[in-house]
Image: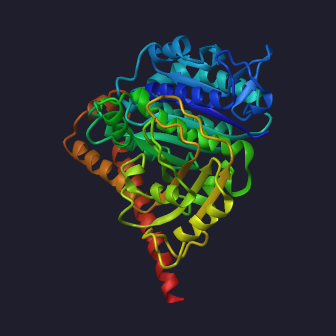
Amino acid sequence: MREIVSIYVGQAGVQTGDTIYTLLSQESRLDENGVAYDTDDVNTALFTETSKGTWTPRCIFIDSEPAVVDEVYVKSKIKNTYTREFFVSGQEDAFGCFAEAKFHNSRTLLPPFVCSFRRVLEECEGMNCLRSTQSLSGGTGSGLGTTILYVMDDVIPKVSKHLHSILPSAHVEPAPTSVYNAVLALAQTETLHNIRFVYDNESMTNLLNPLFEQSLGTNRVTYRDINLLPALVSSCLSINAKVTAGEMDLVQLSTNLICYRHMKMVSPAFVPLQLYESQQKHNAFSIASDAFNKNHEMCSLNTQTGEYLSCWLLFRGDYDDFEIHKAKKRICHPARQMDIQFKDWIPKFVKQGHIKSRPQYLYDFMHRADQCLLKVSNHSNIMAVQNDMLDQYRTLLENRAFVFHYTGSGMEEGEFTEAIETITNTMEEFSKSAGNAEEEQEME
């Protein structure tokens, strides 16, 4: 058995986690009480069987204050499948401060969390992957999430750790300290994970706006709607872990995508996203070419400039395998017929897989397509996503804005500059490594 254990941290993490497992329960054909219509359909990597014969998720929800956690436990569509001891909450929030969550909230939350995590591990035969989902804009998601990763690095150092992180958006983030929280979390967790999938609310809102404007006549996309996009990504990754192996296995995912140990941020894209009544048909080539459109990225990654280092394509649905092979061949053609730029010195820079199962959807505003594609890309311009945050971070720090909130919660001022150095060194090493590789190839 190769189980996946998920941890959902902070308000955004908890709400997204509930959407993810609602979708995963639907795919495993579980009813609202956790009863399986057919036990052969249950993804045992994600669900464990209880003594009553029902199935419960292998996940933990944790937040600094009880409101969101209790709301999920009481009002969730699949509330009866959850186990109460895997819901951990404190009595007060982190006030949007990384240091408050890391140094204060963690004191009360870590002991019950460790107990809950031990119970989850006891139900596992061979844990394959730890998946953590949180927003780095808030105090709890960034600060408490960082502390949890430090603990996990001691408890399960050899287990692959995959992070799904929602980064601050330039125009829709309400908290002025969100950039501080994100940069500090990115810097301090640099060595604590294998791969990080990055999202931002602005990019995901832009993906859904056309669907809402055409079907509902409004562009008022809610966080509940946005949560569906990370859920679709986790769904494809989870199904893959159940029925495939080799290069499409979750552990192999980071090996195939991450060519430098210090550049572990990747961007997911999911296609198609269509209106409910859409009649448009797709084939392997059309859906693959559509996925490489920059407008389908779930973070502010501009793929029109720079180059892809590596790419992972997961086709899902009733595709012809030969058509998938032809689509990949056209993408990887040395003449770059599709104008998709890859680093030529990386052999086999595109990995692909095919899962026959039909994708599932939760909400009626989206077309329930029979075929879909998940693209996960490691692109040279991912550095620009960090660089934009770093510029805002430097501006705030030069004016010493909000610094007293962090130092008053136990953080040292030197940690601010250390964060800048860590991320700057990461970007410089990445540029240097890529440049050296190209120079060596030219010399040969």
- Residue at 38% x, 34% y is 411
Camera-side residue: 55 or 319? Answer: 319
Would you place residue 318 above or below residue 216 in this image?
below
| The N terminus sits in image quarter | top right
- Quarter location, residue 174: top left
Scheme of image coloration: rainbow
* Residue 46 appears left or right of 91: right
* Residue 268 appears left or right of 205: right
Rendered location of residue 380, percent (x, y): 43, 63
Rendered location of residue 357, percent (x, y): 67, 42
* Residue 237 appears left or right of 422: right
| The C terminus sits in image quarter | bottom right
Camera-side residue: 399 or 60? Answer: 60
Residue placed farthest to the left in the image? 399
Would you place residue 8 above or below residue 111 in this image?
below
* Residue 316 appears left or right of 291: right
- Quarter location, residue 259: bottom right
Residue placed farthest to the top in the image? 74
Report if residue 442 is visible in the image.
Answer: yes
Camera-side residue: 284 or 411? Answer: 284
Rendered location of residue 229, percent (x, y): 47, 38
**How many numbered dots are placed on residues in this image?**
0
- Residue at 71% x, 28% y is 47
Residue placed farthest to the bottom in the image? 444
Report if residue 159 is visible in the image.
Answer: no
Rendered location of residue 363, percent (x, y): 48, 28
